[in-house]
């Protein structure tokens, strides 16, 4: 009898190693069909899940309260499972080299609790070769087992889009791969339990790893092109959003927008690919060029705000600026690798006082990662400028009167930076605002 059949019948369990924005929704989805052990090192997070709280907002508290996932911070419980999915983050170091510490640590913990006959599937975004060349040796060393004999491996890149309620695990085609045909079959059958859109069987683990890493590299390059256009059109005195609206009337024009590229995927994954390319003697030109443009956009936004303060005859050094939104994307609590912090830090270099507010964000995470304490929206007053940084639904509904209340009654023009262009530009310019957007 196959492992898939044993899992389906309830004789064996599936485990999820890493219960963040990616791992937790996967665990919940599988728990509707089979027995699932959900493991995370963060005991505080596990306690939240056990109490019915979803700190990620990915599935909601009600779903967490009703799920049958066996949440635990006890690694020994991984021994209860035979099919393991590893979904931990893969960030980059300050020098943009891959930080494989989380995936190595997860491999170490799993290896210490691995049993014969298991299948291990990695979902973390990595460069081609990491699963077989880095993770497998750790699993073998910690378990004393031999890959291909005592356990099998596979790779199935995560495609969950945090905050996206349309493109979910169930509705996105799932790439799966295995070390051999038998393993591939087992992995494909297991994922088919929850992925309604079906699975795509990649011809090898390296192909699956490569497919994932280029998906976000492609988006990164396209957004970099839009950001470069924004810089050029700004110098020409042309509104970029208006240009894109006109160009978008052509059937094959790609609908990308300028913006800050943060988060744990698009702003990170390209560096994994270029790192591996460097090891093989090839220096990336297009990918790294796009990365440089996108990494500098926070500074560019801050510089333009300073220019607009000067234009409004407002002293820069003593200026007070409100930043509305701190997450890396809209309607999501995740602040990891947010580029809003680049704006904040650049404004500080000018001696500007920046107040950050974001009811959607994980305030504890922001304090821990960046040392920034949020200011409640109700306490923000007497500002010289406002940056509408993240297009949260709650900010889209703000009226002019609500924004007016954030400014000082100085008789000077109100400086407004609407990064994503969610407001009516003509309306605010007509009202006397010094309005600017990417």
Image (cartoon, rainbow, N blue to C red):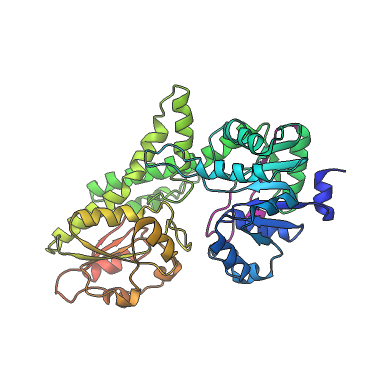
Q: Is residue 58 visible?
A: no
Examine the rendered structure and indicate whether residue 37 appears above or below residue 209. Answer: below
Which secondary structure type mostly characterizes the magenta part of the structure?
A: loop
Q: Quadrant of residue 180?
A: top right
Q: Is residue 344 visible?
A: yes
Between residue 27 and residue 51, name the one nearer to us: 51
Q: Give the residue furthest to the top.
A: 281
Between residue 413 and residue 143, name the one nearer to us: 143
In the rendered structure, the answer to whether residue 232 lies left or right of residue 154 reads: left
Residue 360 image offset from top left, x and y in percent: 45, 67
Residue 268, magenta (yes or no):
no
In the rendered structure, the answer to whether residue 15 lies left or right of residue 23 reads: right
Residue 176 image offset from top left, x and y in percent: 68, 41
Examine the rendered structure and indicate whether residue 141 appears above or below residue 398. Answer: above
Residue 398 image offset from top left, x and y in percent: 37, 73
Residue 159 image offset from top left, x and y in percent: 58, 48
Examine the rendered structure and indicate whether residue 260 appears above or below residue 138. Answer: below
Residue 172, magenta (yes or no):
yes
Magenta-tinted stretch: 159-180
Between residue 342 and residue 113, name the one nearer to us: 113
Q: Quadrant of residue 67?
A: bottom right
Q: Give the residue drawn at x 47%, y 43%.
A: 219
């Amino acid at each position: 009898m196959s492992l898939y059949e044993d899992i389906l019948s309830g004789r064996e369990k599936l485990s999820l190693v890493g219960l963040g924005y990616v791992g937790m929704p996967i665990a919940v989805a599988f728990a509707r069909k089979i027995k699932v052990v959900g493991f995370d090192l963060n005991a505080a997070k596990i306690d939240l899940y056990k109490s019915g709280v979803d700190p990620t907002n990915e599935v909601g508290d009600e779903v967490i309260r009703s799920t049958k996932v066996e949440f635990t911070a006890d690694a020994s419980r991984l021994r209860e499972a035979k099919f393991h999915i590893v979904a931990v983050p893969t960030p980059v170091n300050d020098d943009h080299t891959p930080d494989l510490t989380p995936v190595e640590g997860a491999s170490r913990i799993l290896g210490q609790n691995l049993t014969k006959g298991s299948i291990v599937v990695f979902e973390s975004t990595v460069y081609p070769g990491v699963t077989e060349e880095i993770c497998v040796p750790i699993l073998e060393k910690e378990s004393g087992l031999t890959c291909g004999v005592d356990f099998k491996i596979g790779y199935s890149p995560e495609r969950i889009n945090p905050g996206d309620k349309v493109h979910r695990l169930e509705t996105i085609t799932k790439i799966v791969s295995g070390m051999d045909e038998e393993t591939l079959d087992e992995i494909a059958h297991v994922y088919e339990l929850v992925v309604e859109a079906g699975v795509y069987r990649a011809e090898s683990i390296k192909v699956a790893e490569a497919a994932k890493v280029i998906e976000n590299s492609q988006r990164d390059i396209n957004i970099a092109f839009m950001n470069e256009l924004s810089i050029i059109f700004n110098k020409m005195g042309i509104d970029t959003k208006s240009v894109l609206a006109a160009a978008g009337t052509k059937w094959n024009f790609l609908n990308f927008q300028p913006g800050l590229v943060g988060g744990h995927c698009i702003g990170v994954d390209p560096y994994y690919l270029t790192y591996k390319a460097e090891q093989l003697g090839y220096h990336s030109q297009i990918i790294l060029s796009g990365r440089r443009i996108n990494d500098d956009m926070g500074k560019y936004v801050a510089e333009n705000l300073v220019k607009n303060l000067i234009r409004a005859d407002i002293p820069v050094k003593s200026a007070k600026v409100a930043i509305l939104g701190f997450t890396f994307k809209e309607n999501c609590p995740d602040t990891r690798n947010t580029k809003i912090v680049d704006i904040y830090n650049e404004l500080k270099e000018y001696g500007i006082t920046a107040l950050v507010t974001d009811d959607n964000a994980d305030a504890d995470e922001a304090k821990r990662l960046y040392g920034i304490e949020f200011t409640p929206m109700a306490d923000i007053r007497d500002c010289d400028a406002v940056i509408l940084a993240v297009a949260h639904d709650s900010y889209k509904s703000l009226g002019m009167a609500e924004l007016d209340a954030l400014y000082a009654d100085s008789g000077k023009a109100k400086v407004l930076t609407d990064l994503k262009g969610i407001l009516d530009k003509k309306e605010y310019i007509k009202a006397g605002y010094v309005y600017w957007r990417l």
